[in-house]
Image: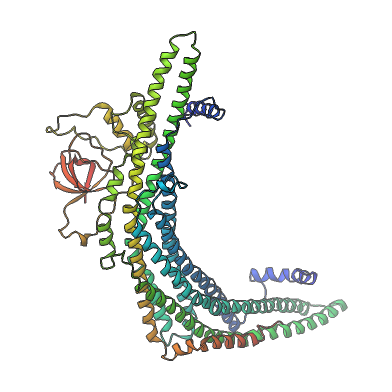
Amino acid sequence: MSWTGFKKATARAGTQILMKTGQVERTNDRDFETELRRYRTMEAAATKLQKEAKGYLDSLRAMTASQMRIAETIDAFYGEAGAKDGVSRSYKQAVTDLDAETIKALDGPYRTTVLDPIQRFCSYFPDVNACITKRTHKQTDYDAIRAKVKKLTDKPDKDVTKLPRAEKDEQLAKAAYDQLNDTLTSELPQLIDLRVPYLDPSFEALVKIQLRFCAEAYSRMAQVQQYLDADTRDQYAQGKLDERVEEVLQQIRDLSIAGTI
Amino acid sequence: MSWKGFTKSVTRAPQTIKQRFNLGEITKDPVYIDAERRFEELEKETKRLHEESKKYFDAINGMLSHQIEFSHAIQEIYKPISGRMSDPDSFMPEGNPEGIRACEEYETIVKELQGTLAPELDMIESRVIKPADELLEIIKTVRKVALKRDHKQLDYDRHRATYKKLQDKKDKTLKDEKAMYKAENDVEQATQDYNYFNDLLKEELPKLFGLEREFIKPLFQSFYYMQLNVFYTLHERMQNIDIGYFDLTLDIEAAFEKKRGDVQEAAEAISIVKFKATGGRKPGSGSKYASKALEAKGERRTTLSEGTETPPPPYSPGPEQNPMSPPLSATSWGSAAKSKPAPPPPKPKPKRLSGVPAAETVTALYDYEAQAEGDLSFSAGDVIEIVTRTQNDNEWWIGKMRGKQGQFPGNYVKLG
């Protein structure tokens, strides 16, 4: 913090204490307070939206990434046996395509229509918050100087020049405060009103991107089926595959190296 | 480690060192070495299969819950925001009731989807992750056997070395003879132990590999069908999404642009959203005190950024048709604003959307703040469409950006 900033902060801290003890009156602007509360609500909602939008993309990526690694592992298992049926190859191809093409193709639109707009909207908040902080500071300054003027009027000082000087300072402080207060009171509702048109298109885009992802993921996965025997599906449905897994697992357990020696 | 284990590892230590540095005679069984290598791979892959199927399971769940949370958040946005929650009269007729309904419908669909997928996902848990887990346990046991075999090999080599040393000794004393007899016994014992484990592993590891393949095949097939089911359900449910609120016929980006219009520009026209850059007011309108403070701030900022940024080149003063030179204070205002890193430029519209052939464009190298009426402001990195330009970049060109047209110094941009 700079020296000037520090001096200001100290002076304001003093005023804060005087306010608490009731020696300085705080200006209360109901309109602004209302708008501020509305703004805070919106800020919280938009920040959450940003988090969720990012989370969705991340989990989508995590899903395809682990699919790919599973495919690699399975291919490695099959690889030693010599991939005769081509299932593992085609599965690997399908998930690789899903990752490389579908996700990459949707990544751009997702960014332009969902992530970036929301992020941009959220990027306004630090600026608005800086403005709000400044307004609070100006308000404190104004309250402090007003209390000073009041004190001088109630109990005139020996130095007669003090009162006019303080009054002039009061005017300046009021102007600075009013300017920021008016800007905020008029512009916060404008920003709040724009939230729906601003963020609404992203919702539709998100839903559409999901639709497209699901459709493509399904069609890519379904292609692998042709490499599997026709009755594998029935075996799966009847739980035969699980039985087989259990059976083999038992055989492995029966190996003497797997037992306790 | 038990006491017995500890004494064993101490007696084995010299031989372990010898083996590490490849000293003396070390038994190498090529068949076993190969099996061991394959076993290591198997171990690694089983571990990976287990971890990844778990991650996959989590990711799908995460995807759905993020969908729901997103819709919650957007619903919050759609709701009318009242400053006084306790006062129902203060609710303003704003917000987006149709949007809220769409959210609710969407949420119902996703929740249903989550419900439908839950058993499928449980199946991944119980039928893929669990068997893989069990296999991993077995592999750990096998790993122990392999370790034991390595120890026995060490013992075998160690005893053999001792025996050989004694045997090679020229004139043996009675003590040596005794020791030799003992060493011979040890060698015999160690050979038996080692062979037992070595043969066991050599015989059974290939069996394990074979079984593993048999194990992985149905496991993979089940996993595949589960996955297919998951995607099928996702696809089915999402396909049937019938929320009138969404225009599903249009392309993603086209619909987005259409629905969005110029709301971003409108939002950015509000001065408080770039308060830090401009101080929230137009140049010249603030009090003298405030503008002074801002100038000071601007100076501070420019000195800060000096080290990192190369200053833009000087441009020639404005063209003749712009005789109004901006007031001096405006210049410093401009520089104060310039030193703040510009927000990322908006993405250019996808080419296929704009039917007209691409016009010549230039990319801004530096920030430029309008100095007079009719100038075009931009930030470094912005892409400007050229309306007219000359060959000389020290002149002022005319360009268009975000629907605004204006002049700017040609040396502030680069072609392309």
Q: Quadrant of residue B162?
A: bottom right
Horizontally, residue B49 falls left or right of residue B237, namely right
Residue drawn at the location 36% of the way across and 42% of the way down: A188
The residue at the point 41 percent across, 20 percent down is A169
Whether residue B192 is visible here, answered yes or no, is yes
Query: What residue do we see at 28% from left, 46% from top?
Result: B266
Extreme residue toward the right, this view? B174
Of B334 and A124, nearer the camera is A124
The quadrant the N terminus of chain B occupies is bottom right
Closest to the observer: A144 or B128?
A: A144
Q: Is residue A57 left or right of residue B369?
A: right
Measured from the top left, where is residue B44 in percent x and y? 55, 74
Residue B403 position in % (x across, y down): 20, 48
Q: Residue at x 26, y 26 (%)?
A: B328
* Label total for image: 0
Taking A141 as reference, is A244 left or right? right
The residue furthest front is B89
Q: Is residue A97 visible?
A: no
Place of residue B227 in the rendered image (x, y in percent of width and height, measured from the top left): 45, 77
Q: From this view, report whether residue A230 is shown above or below residue B319.
A: below
Rendered image coloring scheme: rainbow
